[in-house]
Amino acid sequence: LEDYRQNFIKGLNIITGISEEKLQDYASNNNVFNVLEHPNTINPDKEQLNRIRLLNDFLISYRLLKLDERDAKITLNTAQKSGDYFLSLLSGIKDRERFLVTFLDRSNTIIETKVMAEGDIGESAVYPRMVLKAAMDCDCSAIILSHNHPTGNVKPSAQDLAVTGVLVSIFNPIGINVLDHIVVGDTDYYSMTAHGEVPKPSKRLVNYDAIIYTEKPDTHQPSLESLICEKGAGKREDGSR
Amino acid sequence: MERNEEKMVKATILLKRLFEKNRDEMDQVGLLIQRDGIIDFLKDLDKYEISSDLYEKLYAVKVIVLTLEDLEGSKRKDV
């Protein structure tokens, strides 16, 4: 582990410009591998923080490309396969929320996976219209949704159910199935399909407003009904959630 | 849409922004990634004729990628 640590520190120093001394000092009391997930814990300057973000983005691109190269034809036909797939893309992300959509053909083989929303915690907005456009562009037959919970708690929030319900209801009339919504937290995942929690399509749920989602505590969550009534699951007019 | 080629372009652009290297040099990197794939490109860095500064930075990225992959692999085994 010490070899890993030292190599990681040297690499991070070269890429980000954060001094080895500072990284060594941080590593003496903390898990240095967490620097990428929690960059602010090491008090980087603006440029260093930007480089850490670029490195994180590259790591995601690398993982996606690696998946493409390893399995040119990835088929997501079970909740477990879907869970493992999204776990490889989203595990370990703790400083931001990222919402992915995978577009599948008739045999549930991946056509492509796209990042549809990304932002600081509580700031990510999913735009149903953009998801719809991406689905139309690739002529998919089904989609699978996934996003991460930075706290590691994989239980879906009311917003997670709401965004799923909205997308199920938008895609159902055009014959595109929303097969699952995988919530990833740390090294675990939760499949809504495996738990029978994918909402049924409903005309009432069709809503193209941006949906700001967040991982809310289990208590005091608004109900799905309250999120979808009147304004649907989208952002309210006053900008609050 | 984000097909394999577009992902490679995106990865190359991210490296370019990360390294602040000149366009020609990163175009070369982009072509090599497209030709050999991202895995083999990083694995076989030694065989490419690239500047020592670019090599050092790419090698640093390779070390970080491999370290995180190894750690992730062992973490999953533990789980």
Image (cartoon, grey):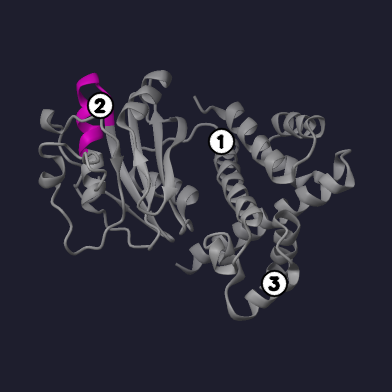
Q: Which residue is mark 2?
A: A171
Q: Nearer the viewer, residue B5 or A55?
A: A55
Residue A79: quarter of image: top left
Q: Residue at x 33, y 24 (%)?
A: A141
Secondary element under disc 2, as helix, strand or loop, is helix
- Which circle's residue, 1 or 2, is located before the other in the chain? 1
Residue plotted at (55% across, 32% down): A72
Query: What's the magenta region?
Result: A165-177
Q: Kindly identify which numbered label has been placed on residue A68.
A: 1
Along the viewing direction, whichever of A109 and B24 lies nearer the viewer = B24
The answer to whether residue A241 is left or right of residue A91 is: left
Q: Residue A51: percent from the left, percent from the top? A: 64, 51
SS class, disc 3: helix
Q: CA distance from mark 2 to mark 3?
A: 50 Å
Which secondary structure dominates the residues rendered in magenta?
helix
Amino acid bearing label 3 = Lys
Percent x, y of residue B60: 75, 54
